Image: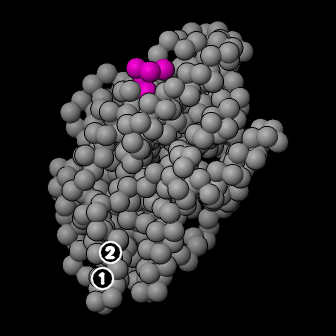
Amino acid sequence: MFRTIARYGARQAPGAWRAAMRALLSGQGVRGPAIREFEERFASYHGVRHAVAASYGRMAFYYILRALDLPAGSEILIPALTFWVVPEMARVAGLKPVFVDVDPHTYTLDPRALATALTERTRAVVPTHLYGQPCDMNAILTVAERHGLIVIEDCAHALGATYRGRKVGTFGHAAFFSFQLLKGLNTYGGGMAITDDDALARRIRRLAEAEPWPSALSVLGKLVLGWLQQVFISPRGFTFSLFPVFWLASLLGDRDVSAFLWEKIRRLDPLPASYRRRYSNAQAVIGLRALDHVEEWNARSRQYARRLSEGLAGIASLALPRPLPETEPVYYQYCIRVSDPEALTRRAIRRGIDIEMMHVDICSTLPLFASEARPCPIAETAAETRQLPVYSGLRPSDVERIVRVIREISRDLPPLGIAAGEVAAHGRFD
């Protein structure tokens, strides 16, 4: 059978889904001891004192912001290249998001750009470890300490990544993680806030535990929907579901039909009722089993990323990821810059390889944040990037095929240069 390669792959520990279903059937799908055990083990994994589970990663962020009790209208610095929900949740919490440009090689928050965004109203900064690449935390912390800023790390893509030997999420005042289907730890939704600050942890927990419990039926729905989504992105499922749609779209021009699958960009005030729920025991059962495999999964993704870097080196039309020194990324995705990204995407899907077109948002250009718009020219070049599959569920033969196909279809693309982004003329890219 023709084997296609989806852009995403969901991680799941053996037997975890069945264990969660057993918890539901035994009456412990909603409340139960696994929640606190999962929080304690997650905190221990990071070497911090406190972890608090939430219904979403975005809600973990929201609880952190509320618990900090910053003055209304305070400015919070957020990288322009991130998921639109992050600045929107800051706005729901009564803060003003201010967008900061990103580094041209890692696409994470550029510490040099922080100074231009600071005002007397700035109170916090959110370094986002995008695509599993750690930010330059020493430089960011230096600026934050000089100006008395709260640091909240966005680790949604980066569970297990390290910066100078320490896990990301342990540098700032607090951090948040996402357990959505495609993330480094998948519990079919949910998230976690971590901190070493005892008083802050108590306030975060008070907010999270003030939410109502979900119904057993809604927990069952999460598990069933997650299972179905995994089926659709499995090699066989993707081949007979989304792949034909993407393949046909490639014949009709540069149409990103995957955009119809994305969450609608919108205001979130008031917060949707589905957000205001507690994290379930059945999900924590899955999380506990997944924690046993995170390091193994991350090691495999790193191995695949090294093979991609070796196999794609020297291609003039591509710029490959360049992690910071003394960092160990987890490669949630393998982000490359391409001289003709539309052509690469179109050619790849016709060879059975699905490439992510734009995983996050250039928030500084979104109509939703028109009142907060400010120039972030490097972030805007993210439209020239693509994210190659590198997830741990791939076979080594899949990775070899990705290398072979990308080399072949990139051969006649124009070299990267001024045409691929004016910033190249200023030496910002190699």
Q: Main secondary structure of the magenta part?
A: helix
- Secondary structure of the residue carrying tag 2 is helix
Residue 265 vs residue 260, the one in the foreground: 260
Say above or below: 363 vs 65: above
Please provide the residue range marked out in magenta.
308-312
Say above or below: 23 vs 8: below
Check disc 1 and report the residue beneath it. 22
Q: Are marks 1 and 2 in contact (CB under 8 Å)?
A: yes
Q: Is residue 279 visible?
A: yes
Say above or below: 238 vs 171: below
Going by the numbered disc 2, the residue's amino acid type is: Arg
**Residue at the spot 54% in from the left edge and 36% down from the top edge:** 387
Q: Is residue 152 left or right of residue 197?
A: right
In the rendered structure, find residue 18 and report the number of the disc placed on it: 2
**Residue at the spot 40% in from the left edge and 20% down from the top edge:** 310
Q: Please, which colouring scheme is shown?
A: one colour
Residue 182 vs residue 211, the one in the foreground: 182
**At which x and y percent is residue 67?**
38, 63
Q: Residue furthest right?
A: 252
Dot 1, how many residues are within 10 Å of its Cα: few (below 14), some (14-19), or many (20+)?
A: some
Dot 2, how many residues are within 10 Å of its Cα: few (below 14), some (14-19), or many (20+)?
A: some
**Residue at the spot 27% in from the left edge and 25% down from the top edge:** 326
**At which x and y percent is residue 39?**
24, 65
Residue 81 vs residue 142, the one in the foreground: 81
Q: Is residue 211 left or right of residue 118?
A: left
Name the image quarter holding residue 279. Answer: bottom left
